[in-house]
């Protein structure tokens, strides 16, 4: 139950959901002598959970902080480079306007999909006490876990299996209805996959990826596939695909997956459902808003210095 997510002991008001977005943008040349910018936004979703992906949230808070990174980028140590300015922005907001403190934070970066199960989203969640969701825009490879190619094969197979079962065999009439499901969860895990597939597993249909995603988009907010740590058999993240998309045309969701993991004080299932529910494009709207504003600030800074 998404409504059970709490912050400071208070359940989410189901008529209003406050969602924070955190992102750090760096200059294109990533010169340590140039400043990066940390951005924090808070969006209000009224009438939640009746919110749909076409709903435009209200921007109720936005702040940023330019800073010079003190350490270079090192894989799996992102929190040491980016977390401090983000935490400073959150602290300032809580002190100045505690009444709009988010029910949940979306962080551009991984949560428990991390070699020590402690990505930047975990760090922010533990420090603030606010439930956090890690949003990985790019695939992060863990030792002993699937590769990006393995994920893409698993995503393709997952979509084909869903289409075969629900559309071809059951002849589902894929129509957009008010009671559309939030998410379709595939039953198969993405693991260290084999290159070869048995002939019996080949789909009987000849639908293209676009056709399958169009059918999915009409009845669901996305397809999630659990990403399994092959060393421990634990599900650490979901590859989310078919969500968002071009809401103006309403044709289909996106092909390129994002990688959702729990940060702190939230279940992985709630994290992926919220991510699909609040995505108008490939990236959940709170992170997309923070990323867009950060890039705008960097462009303005470059123009000023030119």
Image (cartoon, rainbow, N blue to C red):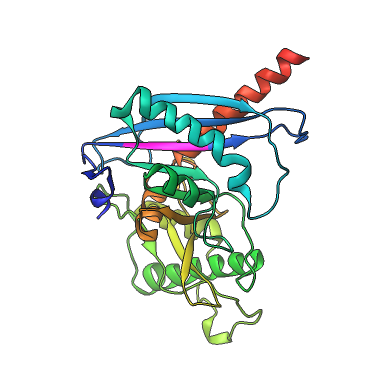
Please identify the quarter of the rendering in which residue 46 is found.
Answer: top left
Above or below: residue 46 compared with residue 72: above
The image position of residue 87, as x and y in percent, is: 49, 36
- The total of numbered circles placed on residues is 0
Above or below: residue 197 compared with residue 148: below
In the picture, the quarter occupied by the C terminus is top right
| Residue found 39% across the figure and 67% down from its top | 167
In the picture, the quarter occupied by the N terminus is bottom left
Q: Would residue 155 be visible to someone looking at this image? A: yes
Q: 194 or 226: which is nearer to us? A: 226
Q: Is residue 51 left or right of residue 116?
A: left
Q: Main secondary structure of the magenta part?
A: strand
- Whether 106 is among the magenta residues is no
Q: Is residue 244 left or right of residue 34?
A: left
| Residue found 39% across the figure and 53% down from its top | 271
Q: 168 or 142: which is nearer to us? A: 142
The image position of residue 212, as x and y in percent, is: 48, 60
| Residue found 61% across the figure and 70% down from its top | 146
Q: Give the residues drawn in magenta, as a range.
A: 18-22
Q: 38 or 245: which is nearer to us? A: 38
Q: Is residue 259 left or right of residue 299?
A: left
Above or below: residue 291 compared with residue 215: above
The image position of residue 127, as x and y in percent, is: 44, 44
Q: Would residue 59 be visible to someone looking at this image? A: no
Q: Is residue 103 left or right of residue 264?
A: left
The image position of residue 61, as x and y in percent, is: 40, 25
Q: 59 or 119: which is nearer to us? A: 119
| Residue found 66% across the figure and 66% down from its top | 149
């Amino acid at each position: 139950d998404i409504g059970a997510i709490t912050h400071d002991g208070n359940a989410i008001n189901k008529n209003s959901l406050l969602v924070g977005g955190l992102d750090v943008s760096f200059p294109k040349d990533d010169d340590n002598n140039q400043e990066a910018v940390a951005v924090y936004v808070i969006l209000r979703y009224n009438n939640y959970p009746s919110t749909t992906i076409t709903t435009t949230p209200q921007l109720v808070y936005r702040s940023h902080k330019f800073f010079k990174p003190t350490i270079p980028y090192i894989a799996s140590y992102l929190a040491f480079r980016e977390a401090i300015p983000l935490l400073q922005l959150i602290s300032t907001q809580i002190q100045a306007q505690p009444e709009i403190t988010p029910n949940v934070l979306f962080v551009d970066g991984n949560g428990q999909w991390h070699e020590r199960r402690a990505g930047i989203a975990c760090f922010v969640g533990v420090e603030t006490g606010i439930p956090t969701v890690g949003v990985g825009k790019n695939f992060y490879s863990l030792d002993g876990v699937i590769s990006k190619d393995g994920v893409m094969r698993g995503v393709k197979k997952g979509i084909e299996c869903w289409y075969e079962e629900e559309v071809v065999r059951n002849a589902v009439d894929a129509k957009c209805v008010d009671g559309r499901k939030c998410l379709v969860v595939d039953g198969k895990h993405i693991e260290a996959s084999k290159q070869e597939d048995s002939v019996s597993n080949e789909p009987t249909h000849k639908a293209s990826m676009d056709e399958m995603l169009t059918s999915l988009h009409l009845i669901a907010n996305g397809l999630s596939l659990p990403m399994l740590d092959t060393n421990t058999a634990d599900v650490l993240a979901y590859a989310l695909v078919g969500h968002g998309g071009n809401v103006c045309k309403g044709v289909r969701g996106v092909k390129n997956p994002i990688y959702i993991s729990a940060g702190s004080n939230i279940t992985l299932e709630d994290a992926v459902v919220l991510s699909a529910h609040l995505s108008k494009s490939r990236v959940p709207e709170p992170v997309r808003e923070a990323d867009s504003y950060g890039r705008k600030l960097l462009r303005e800074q470059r123009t000023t210095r030119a």
